[in-house]
Image (cartoon, rainbow, N blue to C red):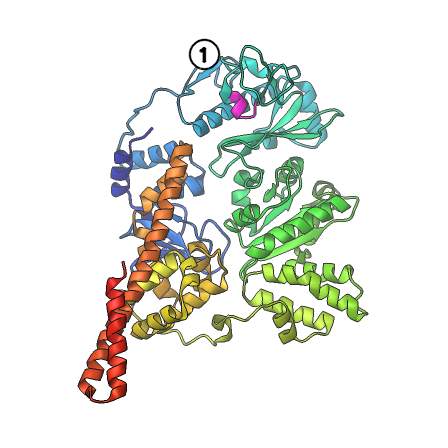
Amino acid sequence: MIPQAFIDDLLQRIDVVEVVGRHVKLRKGGANFMGLCPFHNEKSPSFSVSPTKQFYHCFGCGAHGTALTFLIEYSGFTFPDAVRDLAQSVGMTVPDTRAQAHEISGDSDGTSGVAFDESRSRSTAIIEALEIAAGFFRNTLRGSQRAIGYLKDRGLTGEVAARFGLGYAPEGWNGLQAAFEDYRSAVLVDAGLVIAKDATGNEDAEPGANTRVYDRFRDRVMFPIRNLRGRVIGFGGRIIDDGEPKYLNSPETAVFQKGQELYGLFEARQAIREQGFALVVEGYMDVVALAQLGVANAVATLGTACTPNHVQKLLRQTDRVTFSFDGDSAGRKAAWRALEASLPLATDEKALSFLFLPAEHDPDSYVREHGRDGFLEAVKAAVPLSEYVLREVGRTNDLRTAEGRAKALFDARPLVKALPAGALRMQLVRALATTTGAAVGEILESFQIAQSAVSRRAPPRRIDRKPPQGLAQRALTALIMYPVHAHGLTSSDIATLEEAADDARDLITETIEAAKAQGPDVDFLAMSDALRESPNREIYEALMQDILAVEEYKRDLLLLRTSTDDAKEEAEATRRGERRDAAANELRDTVRRMRSLAIRAELERIAQAGLRDADNMEAYRRLVEEQGRLLREP
């Protein structure tokens, strides 16, 4: 474990502008440096690097962090490697306060027994075991002419196999015994590498004297699954001959959840940036075969339907995602599930589309028949998300009848409501109106959708202005940090905020409306996206930079450290909850103080006007009572 004090000292000596500037072309823009975001495709710069606060933030995709975070996310370094790289650049030596993770008694490919330290955190031990196994599988592939022949028959070269770290799990029940000194270790069970089966047939048993332990993967070509840092977190195994299942995946573990990871994303990141879009296909072999044929920006789900987590992870890398599944009925069902997962994330600046190949083709076979350029032309003609929705509700209903048109609207309602508020949703509503003959207003009322005031109002002329100060600044900070609290504001609270904010009244109104338009699950990232198109963008950018500067590097290191265990994750969740509660208290206190100031000003006005009038006396009495209640509130 690298001491936290060393990390703190290191980050004090590092210039984030210099570190980021090695990879991103930056230009001075006021107090900060701006450039095109390296984490997603964009035409106008929204990537800001602050030399005074020593952090970066993208207002397009939400990527943010310190110099250390940047190396981990952009270069794919592990946490320790990123620390060592930065330390070397400033002449510091990383203290080695932990024992060696493992002692290798043979070569580094894991062909002889390896002992690893099980006292380390569960997640770290699992990743360590998986990477040892990956080395063993790679080494075994070199000696298996049968597995090599299978890959050659699929058109793969040794170069692409090495790039994706392909390997071979040998025949037999205990092949991995050659890779680990303690083959019966519970860590290997937790990592999904071996199965421990007791006398009753239970395959979830703890390894012991009365359990049979054997390899999960046998006689399979192995596809290591890497996270965005390049660490092996699981495997997919493809059987060579006939047999079931054709593909076998690692079970879910402390480091691997199928609904959150994508095969090939680590390898495809650079190609995604260069091509400007990500291609989602069905299987591991599709990804590798497409890379072999020059389409290197493909990723695949891991034997499960596409989830919102998958889509969100891709949209952090690029603004364009195309789904291309097999042309059969199963592929079309997978495409529809991908559409449902994409709807909540289909904001106006994102483009999601669906490529439907002929039934006899998958992406691999299509590229082999039509070539890379022919496939990319097909991608350009992919069906946009909105058109896919319209096509499907029209295909499944008879639009010639009133009943069919009504059913089409009924089917479209949950799909449209799942879209975030914005221009795309309104365009889809207008298209539905044209298709069904209903008026736009009727559809909006039927779907219980109202245009937000932000979208209705013509944007004001952009003017230079200074960020708000005092109570208005406190209120805006709390609302932007945890915008979910905007949903708990009463009409009286909102009126107080708007009336007391003076020159920042429009900012308060816009922030509250934006938060409510995003729905009850709105978070900081969603607000960053919503406010970046505002004519007041520079004001919000300054406020968000101030927010992120607070203990920023410590928060990022806690989130990205590779050695986190369950206890640390629980502590982090508790800390986040405390910050959220603190923001709610801050907002309530700000409203109370604003109201107190307004009451004091009104009391002075009434006193100056005279208290002889009965109405003035009654108003004065009510205000004094309200002032007393505010003072008594905790």
| Residue at image mark 1 | 105
Residue 526 shows up from this direction = yes
**Observer-nearest of 497 and 56:** 497
* Residue 603 occupies quadrant: bottom left
Which residue is painted at 29% across and 59% down in the image? 31
Residue 417: horizontal and vertical position, in percent?
60, 62
Residue 500: horizontal and vertical position, in percent?
30, 73
Residue 632: horizontal and vertical position, in percent?
25, 62
**Observer-nearest of 146 and 207:** 207
Residue 392: horizontal and vertical position, in percent?
73, 58
Q: Residue furthest top?
A: 209
Magenta stretch containing residue 520, yes or no? no
What is the three-letter code of the residue carrying label 1? Ser
Which residue is painted at 54% across and 22% down in the image? 189
Q: Quadrant of the C terminus?
A: bottom left
State left or right for residue 140 relative to residue 316: right
Q: Secondary structure at mark 1?
A: loop
What is the crowding at mark 1: few (fewer than 14 residues within 10 Å), some, or many (at least 20)? few
Q: Is residue 34 above or below residue 404?
A: above
Residue 533 shows up from this direction = no
Which residue is painted at 66% across and 32% down in the image? 156
Q: Which residues are magenta?
A: 188-193
* Residue 610 occupies quadrant: bottom left
Q: Is residue 404 above or below residue 437?
A: above
State left or right for residue 459 relative to residue 552: right
Q: Is residue 380 above or below residue 576?
A: below
